[in-house]
Image (cartoon, helix red, strand yellow):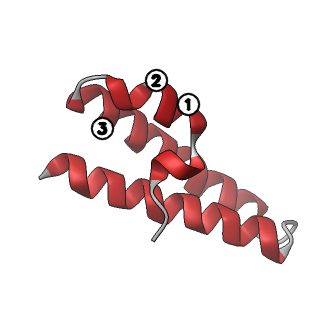
Amino acid sequence: MTELSDLDYLYKSTVSKLSTESRLFYCTRQLDKLQLLLINNAESLGRQPKEQLKEMIRATQEEINKLQK
């Protein structure tokens, strides 16, 4: 599975250096935005952009799980 830091440059370069609480906050907000984007644009997005969003969602969920442990 792809790591969030491989998909999100901002997370890799800046957010990953912050406290666990700040990283968790960023990931939670990012997840909400990504899911809303996918829901609101599901019909108009092509297969590849939809899959990219789903991959980003999975990576963000995995990062949240890691941070909560």
Residue 4 lies, in percent from the top left, at: 47, 51
Residue 49 lies, in percent from the top left, at: 78, 64
- Seen from the viewer's position, the closer of residues 13 and 52 is 13
Instruction: State which quarter of the image contains the N terminus.
Output: bottom left
Residue occupying image coordinates x 31% and y 22%: 18
Left or right: where does residue 40 sit relative to residue 57?
A: right
Residue 42 lies, in percent from the top left, at: 75, 68
Residue occupying image coordinates x 59% and y 51%: 34
Residue occupying image coordinates x 59% and y 36%: 9
Camera-near label (3 vs 2) is 2
Camera-near label (3 vs 1) is 1
- Mark 3 secondary-structure assignment: helix
The alpha-carbon separation of the residues under discs 2 and 1 comes to: 6 Å
Compare marks 3 and 1 and give the one earlier in the sequence: 1
Left or right: where does residue 51 sit relative to residue 29?
A: right
Query: Mark 2 belongs to which amino acid?
Result: Thr
Left or right: where does residue 23 sit relative to residue 41?
A: left
Query: Mark 3 belongs to which amino acid?
Result: Leu
- Mark 1 secondary-structure assignment: helix
Left or right: where does residue 38 sit relative to residue 34?
A: right
The label shown at residue 24 is 3
The label shown at residue 14 is 2
The label shown at residue 19 is none
Residue 54 lies, in percent from the top left, at: 59, 68
Residue occupying image coordinates x 54% and y 51%: 6
- Seen from the viewer's position, the closer of residues 20 and 13 is 13
Q: Are marks 3 and 2 in contact (CB under 8 Å)?
A: no
Question: Which residue is denoted by mark 1 in the rendering?
Answer: 10
**Pointer 1 local density, CA inside 10 Å: few below 14, some 14–19, many at least 20:** few
